[in-house]
């Protein structure tokens, strides 16, 4: 199976889609999304890696780790930390904040939308019917164009 795996790996790395995906994953917004999504799991991973490295050390099967990180967590975590050190953390941090704002807007928009529509209904109560129809159409079209606005409250 090793020969098949090597052949399929080489074939996959030659595909344009794979090259595009690797290029997209190396951009700061994608790195920020991965970081935000995987950060809650990092304590569990670090504890398990430290336990695994401790067991390897007790069995005497460690293979000459040179860095402090590799001595505590192992070579795999050491490679990940080395890769993380090459990131531009100022830009990644900015995109983490942008992602957080987008999530908060996505959660808060329906609440404020219902309040806005209730207020708008109260304001338009004494208007002419034609103006109400026109304003309802215009505001509905505007709200449909906004990405964080869900459709059902507009109906």
Image (cartoon, rainbow, N blue to C red):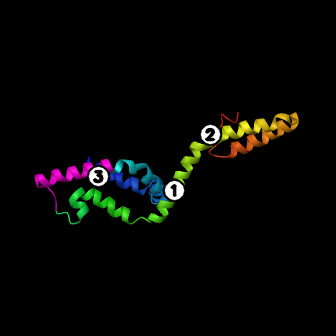
Tags 1 and 3 touching, CB below 8 Å: no
Q: Position of residue 80 (x, y in %)?
A: 33, 59
Q: Residue at x 38, y 53 (%)?
A: 11
| Disc 1: which residue | 97
Point out which mark residue 111 bears: 2
Tags 1 and 2 touching, CB below 8 Å: no
Task: Judge from the rendering whether residue 32 lies leftward or rightward of residue 64; answer left or right.
Answer: right
Q: Is residue 92 above or below residue 54?
A: below
Cα distance in 3D space between marks 1 and 2: 22 Å
Instruction: Give the magenta range.
Output: 43-63
**Could you tell me what secondary structure mostly forms the magenta stretch?**
helix
| Disc 3: which residue | 46
Q: Position of residue 90 (x, y in %)?
A: 47, 65
In-front residue for pair 28/115: 115
In-front residue for pair 3/34: 34
> Is residue 46 located in the magenta-colored stretch of the structure?
yes
User: In terms of sequence position, does the residue under pointer 1 or pointer 2 come before the other?
Assistant: 1
In-front residue for pair 117/8: 117
Of circles 1 and 2, the one toward us is: 2
Q: Which image quadrant for residue 141?
A: top right
Within 10 Å of disc 2 (Cα), the crowding (few <14, some 14-19, many 20+) is few
């Amino acid at each position: 199976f090793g020969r098949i795996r090597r052949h399929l790996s080489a074939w996959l790395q030659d595909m344009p889609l794979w090259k595009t995906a690797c290029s997209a994953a190396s951009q700061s917004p994608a790195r920020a999304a991965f970081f935000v999504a995987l950060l809650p799991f990092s304590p569990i991973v670090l504890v398990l890696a430290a336990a695994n490295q401790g067991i390897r050390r007790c069995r005497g099967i460690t293979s000459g780790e040179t860095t402090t990180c590799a001595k505590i967590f192992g070579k795999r975590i050491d490679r990940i930390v080395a890769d993380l050190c090459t990131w531009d953390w100022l830009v990644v941090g900015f995109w983490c904040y942008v992602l957080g704002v987008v999530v908060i807007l996505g959660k808060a928009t329906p609440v404020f939308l219902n309040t806005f529509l209730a207020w708008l209904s109260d304001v338009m109560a004494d208007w002419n019917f034609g103006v109400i129809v026109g304003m309802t159409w215009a505001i509905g079209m505007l709200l449909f164009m906004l990405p964080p606005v869900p459709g059902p409250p507009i109906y």
